[in-house]
Image (spheres, rainbow, N blue to C red):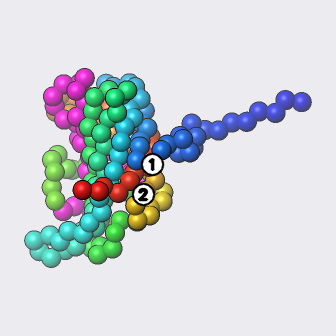
Amino acid sequence: MVFTSYTPLDSALKHVLLEGTYSFRTTGDLQQGLQGRIDFEKGIEVSDDGVPFATLKLNLQNNETSSHHTMGFLISKENRFKDISEGTYNVKNSIDGFIPNFDGVFGFANVKRLGELPFFAYKGSITIDDIKEDTLNGSLRINMRNLNGRTIFINGDFMAKIRIE
């Protein structure tokens, strides 16, 4: 008799991540792994017309062993005076630049190896699996493109720490 064990890569990565790190795989015009540091900020913003938006900002920075890159994601939920909670949030595909009040996910990436034009999220989602006061765990599947039509497809997991100023 032969016994084998199979652990999907995605679930294995969630257990290996250290607090404050991410591990992503990319395809498209960038095909490699991306690792680095990640922190988050929670907040409530009120639009000019008085509508509250709960926000969660994810700030990502590469580590020394990964391709030089920076990324950021903003989850915003309309009509919420409570913080963003566990769940899946979809990319708002009509956003071409940063706007302060919207319902969905906005994302950007700068990858030095691919030139100076930034990439913006146009499709995908971020899932928050567990959120505590000072840490949150989740995953993302995001498609990004720049103005020249180059694309990056990002998939992976993160364990963010609260940002301390």
Which span of residues is magenta-colored? 101-127
Does the magenta segment cover residue 84? no
In the visual, does 51 lie left or right of 80? left
> How far separated are the C-alphas under marks 1 and 2?
8 Å
Q: Kindly identify the residue that appears in the image at 21 percent across and 50 percent down.
A: 94
13 over 42 or under it: above or below = above
Q: Kindly identify the residue that appears in the image at 15 percent across and 76 percent down.
A: 50
Instruction: Give the residue furthest to the front.
Output: 165
Instruction: Give the residue furthest to the right.
Output: 1
In the visual, does 152 lie left or right of 13? left
Give the image location of residue 59, x and y in percent: 29, 48
Question: Which three-letter amino acid code belongs to the residue tagged 2?
Answer: Thr
* Other residues around mark 1 within 10 Å, as few (<14) / some (14–19) / many (≥20): some
* Other residues around mark 2 within 10 Å, as few (<14) / some (14–19) / many (≥20): some
Front in this rendered view, residue 135 or 150: 135
Marker disc for residue 135: 2
Marker disc for residue 19: 1
